[in-house]
Image (cartoon, rainbow, N blue to C red):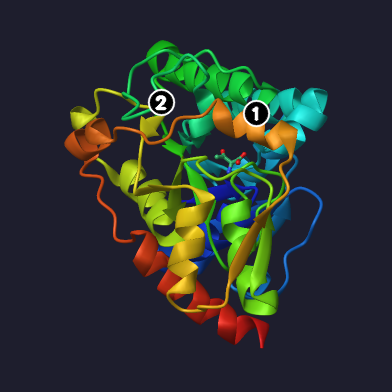
């Protein structure tokens, strides 16, 4: 049985991935690692929790040794909008943090999953059907750290044999833990506001198409790629994965099928708009399908139905 450490376990993806990994591999085999915030509820009660700051390599090493960890899901990261506001912090967490994790993994023979992002692409990347291998010249600090992270993970695999694997996540939509500081966060907020106030003011403009994904598919990707047969992997890190692409009008329309009076208005945030404009509209994920059988379940209509059902119960 795997022995897993999840960094960033209190975040949007980490809080749900940790629970899924505990279901699959056993509660006591999955250590939830968090930096400052101690989790509450089932995340805390269902298995071990340890404070792990990824910028502190000694601490990562201590926890890996203490629990005999063989697999690290490294999710601790600064997202795109915060990275533009605090580039220094983004570099430290996204680059130095990843470097520390890779070094500890090398010393302790751990496999590493690290997500990259659509943010690893930039304005000169083909925006439609973005190929797996293409131009990557992002113009954001987030993008710089994501491209460097992809390369660093590939390097650790080739040079030291560390079993590094990863995917390029699109915007992730979920209903457990709110995302913090991303450009795609509007696609989460819109559901909360639709239920609470039947209206939403969007910070990206109409016609801004981005790849998005519902959390269950994002979690399945993280598990499936780490379980994939390594002999079939031509790529290792940063597989494009894609399930749906929409603009704010399309998600508003899908909400109106359930809440007909729902209204969307626009107040553009120039920083996040510029970031979104530099990202692909939709990625080609055929390499992920061919090399490790990537498949998904949720399209926009199915996700909206589920989001509204879950949040209506949660918010009442
Ligand atoms: C963000 O918006 O920063 C993230 C991402 C797409 O990587 N959700």
The quarter of the displayed image where residue 314 is located: bottom right
Q: Where is residue 256 in the image (x, y as percent from the top left)?
A: 48, 72
Towards the viewer: 265 or 138: 265
Tell me: residue 189, above or below residue 118.
below
Figure quadrant of the N terminus: bottom left
Q: Which mark is residue 226?
A: none
Say which residue appears at 35% left-offset and 43% top-offset.
Answer: 242
Q: Position of residue 272 (x, y in %)?
A: 68, 36
Q: Where is residue 302 in the image (x, y as percent from the top left)?
A: 35, 68
Q: Position of residue 202 (x, y in %)?
A: 66, 53
Q: In which quarter of the image is ligand 1?
A: top right
- Secondary-structure class at tag 1: helix
For mark 1, does the 10 Å Cα neighbourhood hold few (<14), some (14 to 19), or many (20 or more) residues? some
The quarter of the displayed image where residue 148 is located: top right
Does label 2 or label 1 sit earlier along the sequence?
A: 2
Task: Tell me the residue that label 2 is attached to.
Answer: 127
63 left or right, relative to 294: right
The answer for how far apart the CA atoms under marks 2 and 1 are is: 14 Å
- Secondary-structure class at tag 2: loop
Task: Tell me the residue that label 1 is attached to.
Answer: 274
Towards the viewer: 314 or 196: 196
Say which residue appears at 66% left-offset and 51% top-offset.
Answer: 33
Towards the viewer: 271 or 225: 271
Tell me: residue 135, above or below residue 112.
above
53 left or right, relative to 291: right
Figure quadrant of the C terminus: bottom right
């Amino acid at each position: 049985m795997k022995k897993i450490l999840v960094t960033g376990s209190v975040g949007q993806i980490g809080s749900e991935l940790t629970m899924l990994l505990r279901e699959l591999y056993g509660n006591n085999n999955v250590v939830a690692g968090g930096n400052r915030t101690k989790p509450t509820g089932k995340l805390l009660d269902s298995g071990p929790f340890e404070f792990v700051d990824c910028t502190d390599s000694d601490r990562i090493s201590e926890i890996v040794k203490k629990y005999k960890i063989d697999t690290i899901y490294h999710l601790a990261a600064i997202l795109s909008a915060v990275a533009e506001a605090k580039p220094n912090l983004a570099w430290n967490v996204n680059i130095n943090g990843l470097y520390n994790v890779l070094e500890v993994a090398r010393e302790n023979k751990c496999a590493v999953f690290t997500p990259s992002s659509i943010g690893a692409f930039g304005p000169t990347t083909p925006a439609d059907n973005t190929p797996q291998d293409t131009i990557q010249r992002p113009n954001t600090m987030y993008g710089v750290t994501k491209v460097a992270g992809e390369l660093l993970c590939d390097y650790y695999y080739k040079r030291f044999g560390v079993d590094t694997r990863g995917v390029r996540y699109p915007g992730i939509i979920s209903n457990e833990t709110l995302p913090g500081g991303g450009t795609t966060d509007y696609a989460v907020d819109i559901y909360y506001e639709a239920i609470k106030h039947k209206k939403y003011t969007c910070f990206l403009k109409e016609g801004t198409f981005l790849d998005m994904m519902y959390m269950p598919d994002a979690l399945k990707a993280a598990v499936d790629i780490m379980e994939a047969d390594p002999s079939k992997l031509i790529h290792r890190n940063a597989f494009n994965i894609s399930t749906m692409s929409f603009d704010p009008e399309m998600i508003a329309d899908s909400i109106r099928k359930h809440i007909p009076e729902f209204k969307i208005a626009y107040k553009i945030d120039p920083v996040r708009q510029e970031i979104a404009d530099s990202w692909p509209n939709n990625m080609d994920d055929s390499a992920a399908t061919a090399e490790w059988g990537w498949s998904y379940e949720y399209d926009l209509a199915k996700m909206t139905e589920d989001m509204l059902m879950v949040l209506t119960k949660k918010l009442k």
